[in-house]
Image (spheres, rainbow, N blue to C red):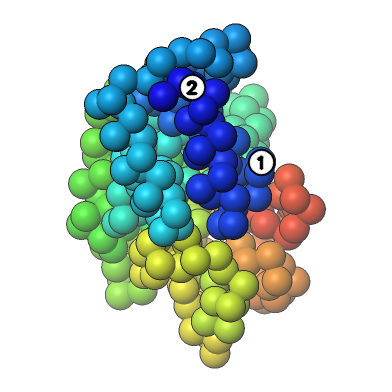
Amino acid sequence: MTLKDFKNYFSEALSETYPKTEIDSFFFILMEEKLNLQRIDTVLKPDFLITDKNLTDLKNILKRLQKEEPIQYILGNTEFYGLPFIVNRNTLIPRAETEELVEWILLETSELRTKNEDKTLTILDIGTGTGCIPISLAKNLHNVKISAIDISSEALKIAKQNALLNKIEVDFIEMNILEVNKLPQQFDIIVSNPPYVRELEKVAIRKNVLENEPHLALFVTDENPLLFYNKIADLAKQQLSKNGLLFFEINQYLGKETVAMLREKGFINIELKNDLFGNDRMIKCELV
């Protein structure tokens, strides 16, 4: 089958399940991953002949996409902040909004550096999953010591593989953050993208997320949606360094409530920031 014919076949097979932009994205990802063809090649080489072996592989992937399995899980990898990451069903798939959080932390870290260039900054990521946040920070910062916590031993296995893949050192710790009263040490920066989707919001979640990504990392009860934020903020009050920073990725519907909680706990300079879609998504605050 030629490349042009397969593209038509691929698009038609997925047309009732996904929007065209997403189908095109899947196609280009697969062409690069499986046939080593860049996007421009798919335009310039419409008569490129796909071998029977590759065609069988691509059709098997197509069947899994028709069942709305995330392409990142099918391929076993994704990209985050320009870096490669291994993913599987034990980890959430890193998202663009979290890249924005990383960018914000890097910006604020550069300002901290101007105050004390020689200081080794200590950073903690809580609920690390793939390790995308600490690994991306470590890759882009110097003179830092970064730790990361997760409750899932299986997620930590993937995070450790990702650290090796990206030639980065992170101290990974298996811990249930809700059951501890103290963090391993003092930190200059604490960041967390904890579970924050309420049960009532399940109806709005796409099938490919709901049926594939780990619920442990996604959901909280309707009755206590700020469970993790409250706990992490309490721990940060004890073990953030003077003028330390706390960053959260948050539920877009609970921005005001999260800000109010942090204010009540004594945090200052609380800043609520929108993501690229215009939703309340990130918070930064300080401890004096």
Q: Residue at x 28, y 63 (%)?
A: 151
Whether residue 48 appears in this view of the structure is yes
- The C terminus, quarter of image: bottom right
Farthest residue, direction right: 278
Q: Would residue 141 be found to the left or right of residue 99 on screen? A: left
Of tags 2 and 1, the one toward the viewer is 2
Vertically, is 278 above or below 261?
above
Total number of numbered discs in the rendering: 2
Q: Position of residue 13 (x, y in %)?
A: 51, 48
From the viewer's side, name the closer residue of 208 and 241. Answer: 208
Residue 3, label in figure? 2
Q: Which residue is drawn at 57% across and 68% down?
A: 205
Instruction: Say what amino acid the circle numbered 2 marks.
Output: Leu
- The N terminus, quarter of image: top left
User: Marks 1 and 2: in contact by CB < 8 Å?
Assistant: no
Instruction: Say what amino acid the circle numbered 1 marks.
Output: Thr
Residue 21, label in figure? 1
Q: Position of residue 39 (x, y in %)?
A: 57, 19
Number of other residues with Cα within 10 Å of mark 2, as a class: few under 14, some 14 to 19, many 20 or more = some
Number of other residues with Cα within 10 Å of mark 1, as a class: few under 14, some 14 to 19, many 20 or more = few
Vertically, is 108 above or below 182?
above
From the viewer's side, name the closer residue of 86 and 203. Answer: 203
Q: Position of residue 225 (x, y in %)?
A: 55, 79
Q: Quadrant of residue 239?
A: bottom left
Tell me which numbered mark, 2 or 1, is placed earlier along the sequence: 2
Provide the secondary structure element on which disc 2 rests.
helix
Q: Position of residue 41 (x, y in %)?
A: 55, 12
Determine the CA span between mark 2 and mark 1. 18 Å
Farthest residue, direction top: 44
